[in-house]
Amino acid sequence: MSGLDTAALATWLKDHMPGVTGPVEAEKFSGGQSNPTYRLSTPTGRFVLRRKPPGVLLKSAHAVEREFRVQRALAGTDVPVAKVHVLCEDETVIGTPFYIMEEVAGRIFDAPAMPGHAPPERGAIIDAMNRVLAAIHDVDLAAAGLDDYGPGGNYYARQCDRWTAQYRATATGDLPEMEQLTNWLTANLPEDDGQRCLVHGDYRLDNLIFAPDAPEIRAVIDWELSTTGHPYADLAAVLMQWGMPATTEGRGLAGLDRAALGLWSDEAFVARYCERRGIAPIADFGFYLAFAHFRMAAILQGVKKRAMDGNAADPARGLRLGEYVPEFARAGLAAAEGRA
C-alpha cells in the first residue's frame, strides 16, 4: 500500500495537469527520511510526487513549497534539476501539501565508494559532483528570482540558533557532547565575510541522479533544506559525509584507500572547488566541519524523534540513523579541536 488516496489525486490531477488522466498508481520510494516520495504511473506518463509527512511537524520543516520554488527557479541554469509541474498547498486533497515533478531516469549511488565501478569512473563522478556544487554556489540569485529565498545576515549564527532549537525540541535524552558542540560553535562564529549564495543544505552523492551510462549529473534532488547562505556549509557537508564509516547506514569512506579506489581526497575536492569558483584557499575550515556535524546530529535527532512518534517515512531505518547522533556530535567536537 502506498498510503496515498490515488482516487482523490487522480481527480485533482485532471483539473490541474491538463492532459494527465487517471487512474493513478503510486509506488513509495524507500530509504528517504524527509518528505515521502512516490512514483506515479498514469496512462499518460510517469511522474514523481513529494509530500509533507503526516503528523505534527516542526516549524519550517519539510517545506515542499520551497523545494518546488527553487527547482522551478533553477530550470535553465547550470544546475541540473527535475522539471516541476504543479504544487498543491491544499491539505484536503491527500492530507498534506505536495508537488509533482518529472521522473528523471538515471543512477543514484547510495554508497560514496561506488562498489563495482572502476577507479577512473569514480573519479569522473566525483569531478561532476564538484562541478555542480560550484555551479549551485555561482547561481545569480537575483536573475533566478531567489534573492529573497532566505534571510541575510550571518548565516552560521542563524543556523546555529535554528538547529539548536530543533535539536532541543526533539531531544530524547541527555547528550553532553551535543551541548559542548553547541556552546563551542556559538563562541567561535566566524565574522560575516559577505558571501551569500544558494545552498542546497544536504548535498551528497545519493542526492544526485546521474545519467545511465555517463558521469553526468541529470538532476540534483531533495532541496528541502535549501536556502540562501554561506557556501562552505555545503562543501563541509560533503567532507563530513566522507568521514563517516563505510557502512550501509554510515555511507562514508572512513578507512578506505581512496587513492586506490580512484576517489578524491578531501584536500583535492576543496582545492578543485576553489579553483572552479576562482576563490582563495579556505582558512580555518575546522569551524565549517564542526558545524556540518552539529547540523547533521540535529537533523538525525529529528528523524529519530519522528520514528519514535510513528511519523517517519521509514521508522525502523529512522531509529537506526538516530543511533548516529552521538557519533556526529563527537566528530564535531573533534573537528572543533582540530582532530578531524
Image: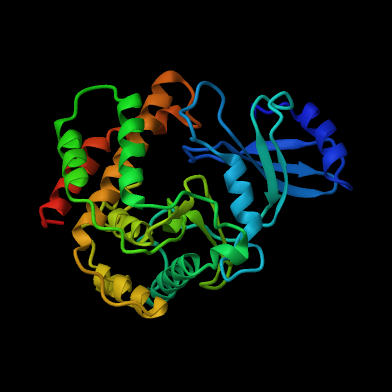
Q: How is the image coloured?
A: rainbow
Q: Looking at the rendering, which quadrant does residue 261 occupy?
A: bottom left
Number of marks in the rendered image: 0
- Residue 115 in the image, given as x and y percentages of width and height: 38, 61
Q: Residue at x 46, y 37 (%)?
A: 33
Above or below — where is 147 with respect to 171?
A: below
Q: Nearer the viewer, residue 213 or 276?
A: 276
Q: Is residue 79 left or right of residue 167?
A: right
Above or below — where is 129 with respect to 252?
A: below
Q: Looking at the rendering, which quadrant does residue 146 occupy?
A: bottom right
Q: Is residue 96 left or right of residue 191?
A: right
Q: Nearer the viewer, residue 250 or 87?
A: 87
Split into 4 quadrants, where in the image is the N terminus? top right
Split into 4 quadrants, where in the image is the C terminus? bottom left
- Residue 328 in the image, given as x and y percentages of width and height: 24, 43
- Residue 112 in the image, given as x and y percentages of width and height: 37, 59
- Residue 223 in the image, given as x and y percentages of width and height: 52, 50
Q: Residue at x 64, y 58 (%)?
A: 73
Q: Does the image show residue 48? A: yes
Q: Nearer the viewer, residue 186 or 312?
A: 186
Q: Residue at x 31, y 64 (%)?
A: 193
